[in-house]
Image (cartoon, grey):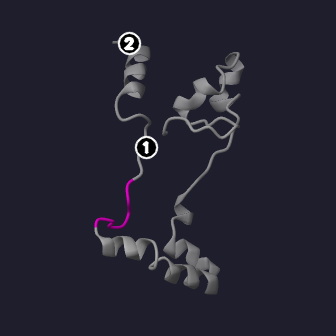
Amino acid sequence: MNLNDEALRYHSSAPPGKLEITPTKPCLTQHDLALAYTPGVAEPCRAIQRNPEDVFRYTGRGNLVAVVTNGTACRGYQRHGGVGAWSNWPIGCQARDGRKGPAL
């Protein structure tokens, strides 16, 4: 199998995308959900209000990144005549109009 065919198989295999999101805390029981959401989420909110640096202790803020693009020059494909915003989605671009594409 050549690299191009292998790449298409790689990108089309289930599940779509390259990353997945999994919980970092237990969320199986009603008690777990009460800690994660209402009413439990109020206490970390109050702690962050008292000390804004606690946002890194109680949230995923220090572990997140966002890439915003219209997709027209994503990963340098513009040099090759461009492949269009929708065609860039397999490498993680999202359309400027906010429509969501496949997971990364």
- The residue segment tinted magenta is 22-28
Above or below residue 37? Residue 4 is above
Label 2 – label 1 distance at C-alpha: 24 Å
Magenta residue check for 15: no
Q: What residue lies at 29% left-to-right and 65% top-to-bottom? A: 28
Location of mark 2 (residue): 2
Q: Position of residue 10 (x, y in %)?
A: 38, 26
Location of mark 1 (residue): 19
Q: Residues within 10 Å of mark 2 (few under 14, many from 20)?
A: few
Q: Secondary structure at mark 1?
A: loop
Q: Position of residue 79 (x, y in %)?
A: 71, 20
Q: Residue furthest left?
A: 29
Q: What residue lies at 58% left-to-right and 53% top-to-bottom? A: 65
Q: Residue furthest top?
A: 1
The three-letter amino acid code for the residue at tag 1 is Leu
- Magenta: main secondary structure: loop
The three-letter amino acid code for the residue at tag 2 is Asn
Q: Position of residue 102 (x, y in %)?
A: 50, 35
Above or below residue 39? Residue 22 is above
Q: What residue lies at 42% left-to-right and 22% top-to-bottom? A: 7
Q: Do the residues under discs 2 and 1 have CB atoms within 8 angstroms?
A: no
Q: What residue lies at 38% left-to-right and 60% top-to-bottom? A: 23
Quarter location, residue 100: top right
